Every structure is written in structure tokens, then in C-alpha cells.
Image (cartoon, helix red, strand yellow):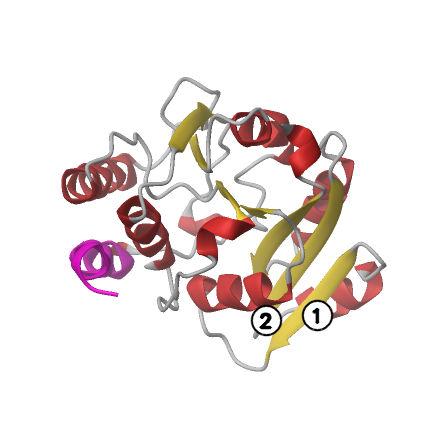
Amino acid sequence: MSGAFHKISILVPVFNEERTVEEIVRRVRAADTGALQKEIIIVNDGSTDGTPAILARLAAADLTVCTHPANRGKGASIRTAIERATGDILLIQDADLEYDPADFPRLLAPILDGRADVVYGSRFLGGPHRVLLFWHYIANTLLTLLSNMLCNLNLTDMETGYKVFKRACLADIQLNANRFGIEPELTAKLARRRYRFYETPISYSGRDYSEGKKINWTDGVAALWFIFRYRFFN
């Protein structure tokens, strides 16, 4: 089935990641995507540190950099990246080194062999992960449970940063969330169209706030609203 796909677009939202962005680009470039041609779409979401200068230096034929003049959020950055992407498969990759591109082969396998339309990389299916932030784990568990109840899924990690899908899955989907609400929005809208979901274990090296973690409790509260909103309304 892999012959049906020719290119993968790796979508990388970036905001103030001068310490990690060069390394994540190196890892993405080195990652195994089999026979798929690889393109990297980075969206610099209004960074105010040294990120823009680093991205200017890294730009090449395989890497497109888009810029938001002001910070708009992860969801807005993903929308911009999708608009520029030309791949048959889209993969969302955070720029903070929490998620390892060495997991690309296991994320792509269910799509390439014809089993799945959408693949989520789960931090809770047994892969190695940094032990960190109990209350984030509880919040993730509760949000995933609520999303599963409303979307009739049995995901273990709805909020994962690793989401992969066929480009065709988004053909008639309008995305609206600007910040981290993009996670429940994608889940609800893809589930409403009854696409085939798969999960696969991934490694996870989480950050704490002293290391630059950006999501906070207000995003968790907002996610509750987004789960209901995007399940029942467009």
C-alpha cells in the first residue's frame, strides 16, 4: 500500500525554541520515512528569541519556513503549515524535543500498510517516557476520557503531539482552534467522519515549565469546551 503515497509533510509549529529547533530539524531530516519523499514545513509563530535567525540559516530545498508576525498559537500554526504542505501524509511534530522523530516508522506503518487513516502516537502505551508532572497526567487522562465518550473512541492519549493522517482526511474539514484546542478539534472532526484511527506507543521526554513548557491549566479548561464544541458543532 505504500506505493499509493509519495510524500510526507512534517508540520512543525515553533515559538521561542532557540535551544531545540536546530536539533529537531536535524532529527527530522535523519528520520526514516521509507520510500516517502520528505518535506518540512516550519511555522515560526512570532518568536521573539533567536529562533528566526536559526531558521533562516537552516532553510533549504526540503525545508520551508513560514512566519506569523505575532504569536497566534499552535492551532493557527498548524493551519498555516497545512496550507503550504504538498504531501499525501501529514505528520505534526513539536519543536521542543519532547517527541522523537525516531518513532516515525511506527507512526507511519498503519497508514502505509492500509490499516489506518489516522494514527496517534500514545505516551501511555508502554514506550519509554520521562516521569514528570502528575497533574498533567491526570488532566490528560480526564480530557481523553471525555473526548472518547463523546467521539465513541478508545484512545489512550487524545492530547498527544504526534498526530498523523492522510491529507485526504482534511479535504472537507475546516479547522478553527488557534491554541492547543487543535488537539480535541482534530480528534472530534476526524472521528465524526468515521476515519480509521490507530494508536502506537512512542517515547516521550517531557519538559517542565523551567525548561520552556508552554501549555498550562487554562488550556486544560479550554479543552473541555472545545471537546463539546467540536463534537457537536463545526
The furthest residue to the top? 126
Residue 230 in magenta?
yes
Splitting the image into 4 quarters, where does residue 151 fall?
top left
The quadrant where residue 144 appears = top left
Residue sitting at 38 percent across and 21 percent down? 125
Q: Nearer the viewer, residue 149 or 52?
A: 149
Do the residues under discs 1 and 2 have CB atoms within 8 angstroms?
Answer: yes
Vertical placement of residue 137 versus 61, above or below: above
Give the x, y percent position of residue 181: 32, 59
At which x and y percent is residue 77? 52, 66
Where is residue 143? Give x, y as percent. Answer: 21, 43
Give residue 8's mark.
none
Between marks 1 and 2, how big is the CA–CA gap? 7 Å
Please, what secondary structure does the residue beneath circle 2 have?
loop
Q: Position of residue 60 (x, y in %)?
A: 85, 59
Give amino acid for label 1.
Pro
Report the residue marked by disc 2.
47
Q: Could you say which is closer to the camera, residue 178 or residue 69?
A: 178
- Residue depicted at x 59% and y 51%: 95
Q: Which residue is mark 1?
A: 52
| Crowding at mark 1 (Cα within 10 Å: few <14, some 14-19, many 20+) | many
First in sequence: mark 1 or mark 2? 2
Residue 115 vertical position relative to residue 187 in the rendered view, above or below: above
> What residue range appears in magenta?
218-234
